[in-house]
Image (tube, rainbow, N blue to C red):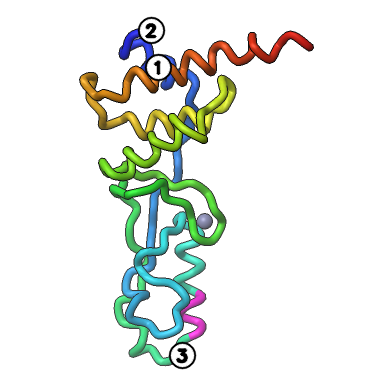
């Protein structure tokens, strides 16, 4: 298997559903006891609820200057982003560091099985920015070939 085939395999086995955009509560770091800061990520629905919660909990309007829903565009992140309220995975592009640590996990303890479409999606996200001369391709291809062989290795008692 060459690198082009590996990219196609990963794409074909990965979940391709659209993920909700990442949002955060703008200005929440300035509100005492808001229970979140701008580093917390939310899906749009949960972010709207969080803003309403903070406003309800703070009758003093002056404390709330600038509180609003922010985000909605694709962000760069060091790790996959999840909504802090409902846990749904959010859309984001991994930084180099993020992609390195994801790839390390996917080539180590978190190798995807053939049917693991979320694992292959994580792989797809992790390899998005790596080039064909990356030294990890042989390891990535080995993980793909392992996944392809596993049904054979474990399929004898079907
Ligand atoms: Zn949510």
Residue 55 has which mark? Answer: none
Please state the horizontal and vertical placement of residue 132, each as a whole percent of the image: 23, 19
Residue that numbered label 1 is attached to = 141
Residue 59 has which mark? Answer: 3
Mark-to-mark CA distance, 2 and 3? 62 Å
Q: Is residue 54 magenta?
A: yes
Which of these two is toward me, 90 or 2?
Answer: 2
> Are the residues at dot 2 and dot 1 in contact (C-beta closer than 8 Å)?
yes
Of mark 2 and mark 1, the one earlier in the sequence is: 2
Tell me where residue 61 sits by quadrant. bottom left
Mark-to-mark CA distance, 2 and 1? 7 Å
Confirm whether residue 158 shows in the render: no
Mark-to-mark CA distance, 1 and 3? 57 Å
Residue that numbered label 2 is attached to = 1
Please state the horizontal and vertical placement of residue 114, each as a whole percent of the image: 56, 20
At a point 42% along the width and 59% down the height, the residue shown is 41
At a point 38% along the width and 68% down the height, the residue shown is 25
Mark 3 Cα shell of 10 Å, populated few (<14), some (14-19), many (≥20): few
Of mark 1 and mark 3, the one earlier in the sequence is: 3
């Amino acid at each position: 298997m060459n690198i082009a085939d590996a990219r196609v395999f990963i794409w074909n086995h990965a979940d391709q559903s659209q993920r909700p955009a990442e949002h955060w509560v703008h200005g929440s770091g300035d509100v005492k006891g808001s229970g979140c800061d701008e580093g917390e990520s939310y899906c749009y629905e949960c972010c709207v609820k969080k803003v309403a919660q903070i406003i309800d909990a703070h009758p003093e309007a002056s404390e709330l200057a600038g509180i609003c829903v922010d985000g909605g565009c694709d962000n760069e992140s060091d790790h996959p982003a999840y909504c802090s309220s409902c846990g749904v995975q959010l859309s984001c592009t991994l930084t180099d560091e993020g992609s390195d640590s994801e790839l390390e996990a996917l080539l180590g303890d978190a190798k995807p099985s053939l049917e693991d479409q979320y694992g292959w999606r994580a792989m797809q996200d992790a390899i998005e920015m790596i080039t064909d001369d990356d030294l990890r391709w042989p390891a990535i291809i080995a993980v793909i070939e392992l996944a392809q062989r596993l049904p054979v290795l474990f399929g004898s008692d079907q």
